[in-house]
Amino acid sequence: MKAYGKNASLRRLVSLTHGELRLAARYGILAVYALFTFMYIMLLLWSNPAARPAAGGVTILSDPAAMGLFFMGAMVMLEKSQRVNSTLAASPVRVGEYIAAKVLALLGVGLLVALIVGAVAGTPLWGVVLCLVLCSPLFTMLAMMLASKSVSLNQFLLLSVPVELIIFTPALFYWFGGVTSPLWLLTPGVAGIALLHPDTALWPYAVLSLLVWNALVAVLCHRMIRAYFDSLGGGKL
């Protein structure tokens, strides 16, 4: 029975992730990212070679790693308008599967874009992988929490701006030498962008910081999405 339950859960997760990718394709998110990727490549190729690693690091953290912060509001609002979540709340789909599907879909797209940008910019590709694997789920879960509490896309955007400022402002200062203390690795943005630096000395601390952030946010996200689903009349999942 346990094996059957695990297989059923895996099938639901695969189906949900595929559905997320189809939704992203249908509403032009994948097309937009293909265009963005082409623009990033052209801008990097036309820039001074010495500036490419710095520009690539900022680009990777602020865009492919943060896809969820930009698109999750629209994705959840579409689900709300089409009553998709009401159906999911009454289905066998678990909250963890719903969250994981969105995380995996955006991580897959973001990682592909980030690796292309990183290769052109000369950013360490192992650092790119670590940054995306640890930052993309974190940012996506944060965005899901905000979206579940938003009644409109405008409200989501208003709620997400302070979160983006808190994450990215210290990261930019750290990347360009405005702040240098290793204690800034306790913030997720600085920990994420530190993984894009060729000096790997601080990578273990950055990874540890992001693992802790992901664990904390995963617990909060699960609770908030479960409460959101319960409010739709689906009962406890």
Image: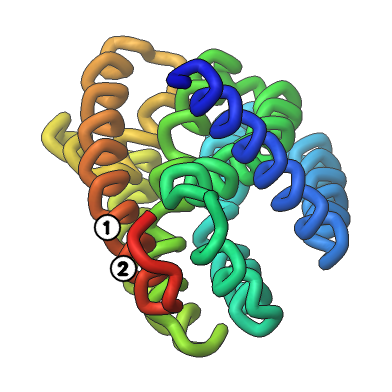
Please determine whether, in this image, residue 24 is positioned above or below residue 107.
Answer: below
Badge 1 is on which residue?
223
Q: Secondary structure at mark 2?
A: helix
Instruction: Give the quadrant of residue 51.
Output: top right
Q: In this rendering, does residue 13 appear at all?
A: yes
**Residue 26 figure quarter:** bottom right
Quarter the C terminus occupies: bottom left
Considering depth in this image, is 27 or 61 the residue closer to the camera? 27
The residue lying at 87 percent from left, 55 percent from top is: 31
Q: Position of residue 86 (x, y in %)?
A: 56, 74
Mark 2 sits on what residue?
227
Q: Nearer the viewer, residue 105 or 183?
A: 105
167 and 45: which one is in front?
A: 167
Q: Quadrant of residue 231?
A: bottom left
CB atoms of marks 1 and 2 within 8 Å: yes
Residue plotted at (27% across, 14% down): 204
In this picture, is 64 found above or below 232? Answer: above
The 10 Å Cα crowd at callout 2, few under 14, some 14 to 19, many 20 or more, is: some
Left or right of 143 in this view: 114:
right
